[in-house]
Image (cartoon, rainbow, N blue to C red):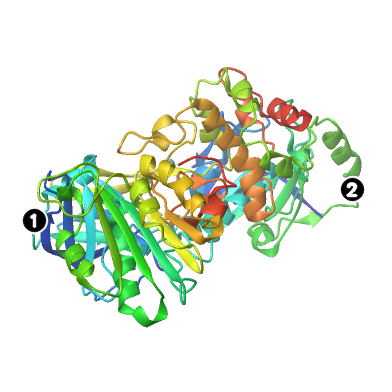
């Protein structure tokens, strides 16, 4: 581990904004910054997750004008500064959907391969955090290019060459500082539900009455899926007129009725309990089936921002009790 | 990197109303950059720029030099497709999906059961089987519609009916002037024809009501679930297993389907 002076790090980051598009926590949300003075957190983890960098809420797949298709070019390089370890893990999970052998998604991959993820350890996790349920933790470094730990005037930093080379000349010896206790304290403060075996269990719960019970107060607003760092479902729409169109990819949500509504009027997931089942099954049964990992990272956004207090941890606990 | 969202350009060579009620229109499309390789049962996304994209099963066989689609006018994109005239440029992505397991079918008897306008990819399959006639044993087709004018590809059906290497059983729901085929619903006719399930595969595509009442007949004829195949439809967008909406359990209808065997479907949520 190395040590880096905060002031000097921010100076360097300001210089790097010339060559990189830098995203960081900007108060309420995660967003693009022009200067490091904008970096601010209103809470331990910000509301909008960094998935927007790789899967923007809307983006053009191509434009169409007078019979010609034009694909937008993107040569930007990105630094994601101060994302949380849970969000870094979420990006690794998004990779599994977009960076596939059969149909690699060029828009996602182009941005992803030109990105450097700098995660910041959570010294004081929030009450909605439950990353430890999924084998991760507030100091987890494996899905980011670097992990920084806030020590007041300086950060402790560890990472790969790609990330550390950004701070060439600024890295000092850490003087043998131990973080074990800090890490343990953070981990111990997180109260996670037990999830072991939930994937297998859910396989036999397709027709369980629990889906009606856990979805009863849900107003299917979709906030959970928009804010979820691992939710990636999207719609493709054409916009424009005359002979000038754009085919856009926009976020979509399995919580919406129109998501699966067919032109004939038939809808296989018309009832909201079916849509809630889809959301839970996708994260805790289908994801493990396909990728051997849960599709939830325990960031807690869906709990914190749900307007009717649906708590995924309680749903997990209920499932485990069936 | 190949961009899977970019459609290929083509031209409509022929377009006509397929059914007497004008709800179905068939398009024969030729791609600008040569023929498409595909397996019967696969589908394409047809784009109408500015309106959107929708998935349609390929009704032509790999041996034909055009791509055929029969489109039911039911929504925004399909209405726009119905307006397309001959020689209009179109945009197509595909082939997408898995297709029928034609290699697994080799050396077996094949029973095709269909109703209404779901016959599209089965036309593709039937022509494929006839193109490779020596690889397959008996071929039986049971195909019904509400009335004669709603059967797809009527001229071809008549031609196939004349052949002695395929058993074609056509049906309409009720007596119709001049109709000489079977009268009755598809499940009833299937039971009457009663094709042997021995050494056989059955492929079924039709409206939900037909499927519902045909399944018990299939069981009665002793077709095991793993030898019954069907093709599913769902609302789709990307067609490549990324956008999320067409899943049934952990499988995507667009990528892992649209063709599934019954034994696989029996273990999944009934979300179709």
Q: Residue at x 50, y 46 (%)?
A: B247
Residue A265 placement: quadrant: top left
Distance from the alpha carbon under mark 1 to that under mark 2? 75 Å
**Residue A312 or B259: which is nearer the viewer?**
B259
Horizontal side of residue A278 vs B259, given as left or right: right
Chain identity of mark 2: A
Q: Quadrant of the C terminus of chain A?
A: top right
| B159 or A65, nearer to the observer | B159
Residue B8 at x, y = what percent? 27, 65
Q: Secondary structure at mark 2?
A: loop
Give whichever of A298, B7 is nearer the camera: B7
Residue A17 in view of the camera: no
Q: Is residue B182 left or right of residue A209?
A: left
Secondary structure of the residue carrying numbered label 1: loop
Q: Residues within 10 Å of mark 2 (few under 14, many from 20)?
A: few
The residue that appears at 75% across and 31% down in the rendered structure is A125
Q: Which residue is mark 1?
A: B85
- For residue A29, which numbered disc appears in the image? none
- Pointer 1 local density, CA inside 10 Å: few below 14, some 14–19, many at least 20: some
Q: Is residue A130 left or right of residue B76?
A: right
The answer to whether residue B207 shows anywhere in this view is: yes
Q: Percent x, y for residue B131?
A: 30, 78
Image spot of residue A18 (x, y percent):
48, 53
Identify the residue shown where x is 74% and y is 34%.
A130
Residue A177 marker: 2
Single out the residue that lies furthest toward the front. Answer: B192
């Amino acid at each position: 581990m190395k040590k880096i002076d905060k002031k000097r790090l921010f100076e360097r980051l300001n210089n790097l904004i010339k060559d990189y598009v830098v995203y960081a926590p900007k108060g309420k949300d995660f967003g693009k910054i022009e200067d490091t003075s904008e970096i601010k957190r209103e809470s331990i983890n910000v509301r909008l997750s960094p998935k927007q960098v790789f899967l923007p809420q809307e983006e053009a797949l191509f434009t169409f004008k007078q019979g010609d298709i034009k694909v937008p070019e993107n040569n930007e390089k990105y630094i994601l500064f101060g994302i949380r370890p849970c969000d870094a893990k979420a990006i690794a999970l998004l990779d599994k959907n977009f960076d596939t052998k059969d149909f690699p998604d060029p828009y996602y991959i182009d941005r992803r391969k030109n990105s450097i993820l700098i995660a910041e350890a959570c010294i004081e996790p929030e009450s909605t955090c439950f990353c430890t349920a999924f084998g991760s933790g507030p100091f987890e470094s494996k899905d980011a290019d670097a992990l920084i730990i806030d020590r007041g005037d300086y950060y402790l930093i560890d990472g790969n060459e790609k990330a550390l080379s950004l701070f060439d000349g600024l890295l000092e010896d850490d003087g043998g500082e131990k973080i074990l206790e800090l890490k343990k304290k953070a981990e111990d403060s997180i109260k996670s539900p037990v999830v072991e075996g939930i994937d297998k269990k859910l396989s036999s719960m397709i027709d369980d009455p629990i889906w009606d019970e856990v979805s009863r107060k849900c107003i299917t607003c979709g906030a959970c899926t928009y804010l979820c760092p691992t939710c990636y479902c999207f719609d493709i729409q054409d916009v424009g007129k005359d002979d000038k169109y754009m085919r856009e990819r926009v976020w979509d949500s399995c919580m919406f009725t129109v998501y699966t509504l067919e032109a004939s009027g038939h809808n296989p997931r018309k009832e909201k309990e079916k849509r809630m089942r889809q959301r839970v099954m996708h994260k805790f049964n289908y994801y493990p089936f396909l990728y051997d990992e849960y599709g939830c990272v325990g960031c807690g956004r869906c709990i914190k921002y749900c307007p009717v207090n649906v708590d995924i941890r309680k749903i997990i606990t209920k499932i485990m009790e069936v | 990197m190949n961009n899977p969202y970019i459609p290929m350009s083509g031209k409509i060579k022929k377009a006509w109303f397929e059914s007497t009620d004008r709800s179905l229109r068939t398009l024969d499309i030729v791609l600008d950059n040569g023929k498409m390789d595909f397996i019967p049962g696969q589908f394409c996304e047809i784009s109408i720029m500015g309106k959107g994209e929708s998935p349609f099963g390929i009704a032509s066989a790999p041996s034909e030099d055009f791509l055929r689609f029969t489109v039911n006018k039911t929504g925004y994109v399909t209405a726009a497709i119905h307006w397309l005239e001959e020689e209009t440029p179109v945009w197509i992505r595909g082939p997408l999906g898995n297709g029928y397991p034609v290699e697994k079918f080799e050396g077996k008897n094949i029973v095709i059961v269909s109703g209404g306008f779901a016959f599209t990819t089965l036309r593709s399959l039937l022509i494929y089987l006839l193109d490779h006639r020596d690889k397959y044993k008996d071929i039986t087709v049971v195909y019904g519609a509400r009335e004669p004018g709603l059967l797809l590809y009527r001229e071809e059906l008549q031609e196939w009916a004349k052949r002695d290497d395929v058993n074609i059983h056509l049906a309409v729901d009720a007596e119709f002037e001049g109709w000489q085929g079977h009268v009755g619903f598809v499940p009833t006719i299937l039971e009457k024809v009663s094709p042997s399930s021995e050494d056989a595969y059955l492929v079924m595509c039709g409206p939900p009501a037909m499927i519902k009442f045909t399944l018990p007949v299939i069981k009665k004829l002793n077709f095991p679930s793993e030898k019954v195949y069907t093709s599913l439809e769902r609302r789709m967008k990307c067609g490549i297993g990324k956008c999320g909406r067409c899943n049934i359990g952990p499988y995507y209808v667009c990528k892992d389907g649209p063709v599934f065997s019954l034994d696989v479907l029996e273990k999944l949520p009934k979300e179709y």
